[in-house]
Image (spheres, helix red, strand yellow):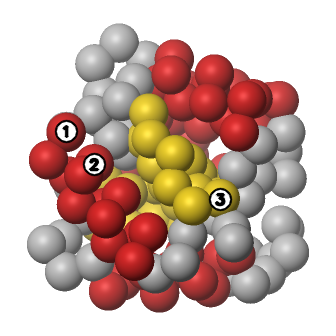
């Protein structure tokens, strides 16, 4: 069972994602802030991080950088409501970029795809 670290500051979305991803057979660990994400990543050693970008305090881009600084083999999917971050070069170290939607099909497909390929084989 793959371990996913879900980083989402909206508690309702976090619960929805956690339930949906658990139903897909993943073990899901949650963090609500960038600081929590860094701590959880070190403790849990996830197989994948799904990271929101816009969060209070430390944003997802900075948290992703710190997590990858600890272990650059962890794939990261940026999951945000803002398409504009896709053009930000700071987001390019992510393995995938998914725009938030009430339909989680794209996110689930992307998770499956990213977990199935070695780090560095980005499309």
Query: Dot 3, how many residues are within 10 Å of its Cα: few (below 14), some (14-19), or many (20+)?
Result: some
- Residue 54 numbered mark, or none: none
Is 68 situated above or below 24? above
Is residue 90 among what the camera can see? yes
Instruction: Give the residue drawn at x 40%, y 77%.
Output: 23
Instruction: Give the residue drawn at x 31%, y 65%.
Output: 19
Figure quadrant of the N terminus: bottom right
Residue at the spot of label 3: 3
Please indicate whether residue 74 sits to the left or right of residue 48 in the image.
right
Estimate the x, y position of residue 36 in percent, counting from the top left: 50, 22
Give the structural element (helix, strand or loop) at label 2.
Answer: helix
Please tell me whether mark 3 or mark 1 is closer to you in this view.
3
Give the structural element (helix, strand or loop) at label 1.
Answer: loop
Q: Are marks 3 and 2 in contact (CB under 8 Å)?
A: no
Q: Quadrant of residue 117?
A: bottom right
Please indicate whether residue 41 sits to the left or right of residue 33 in the image.
right
Instruction: Give the residue drawn at x 60%, y 37%.
Output: 64
Is 13 situated above or below 102? above
Residue at the spot of label 1: 10
Give the structural element (helix, strand or loop) at label 3.
Answer: strand
Estimate the x, y position of residue 48 in percent, counting from the top left: 65, 58
Is residue 83 among what the camera can see? no
Foreground pick, 89 / 34: 34
Q: Are marks 1 and 2 in contact (CB under 8 Å)?
A: yes
Please indicate whether residue 52 sits to the left or right of residue 99 in the image.
right
- Residue 14 numbered mark, or none: 2
Estimate the x, y position of residue 115 in percent, counting from the top left: 70, 76
Figure quadrant of the C terminus: bottom right
Estimate the x, y position of residue 79 in percent, counting from the top left: 38, 57
What is the C-alpha distance between the residues marked 1 and 2?
6 Å
What is the C-alpha distance between the residues marked 3 and 2?
15 Å
């Amino acid at each position: 069972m793959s371990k996913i670290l879900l980083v989402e500051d909206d508690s309702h979305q976090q619960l929805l994602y956690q339930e949906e991803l658990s139903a897909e057979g993943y073990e899901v660990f949650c963090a609500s802030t960038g600081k929590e994400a860094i701590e959880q990543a070190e403790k849990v050693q996830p197989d994948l991080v799904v990271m929101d970008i816009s969060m209070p305090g430390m944003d997802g881009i900075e948290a992703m950088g710190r997590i990858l600084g600890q272990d650059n083999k962890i794939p990261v999917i940026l999951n945000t409501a803002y398409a504009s971050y896709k053009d930000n070069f700071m987001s390019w170290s992510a393995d995938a970029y998914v725009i938030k939607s009430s339909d989680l099909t794209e996110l689930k497909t992307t998770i499956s795809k990213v977990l199935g390929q070695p780090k560095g084989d980005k499309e």
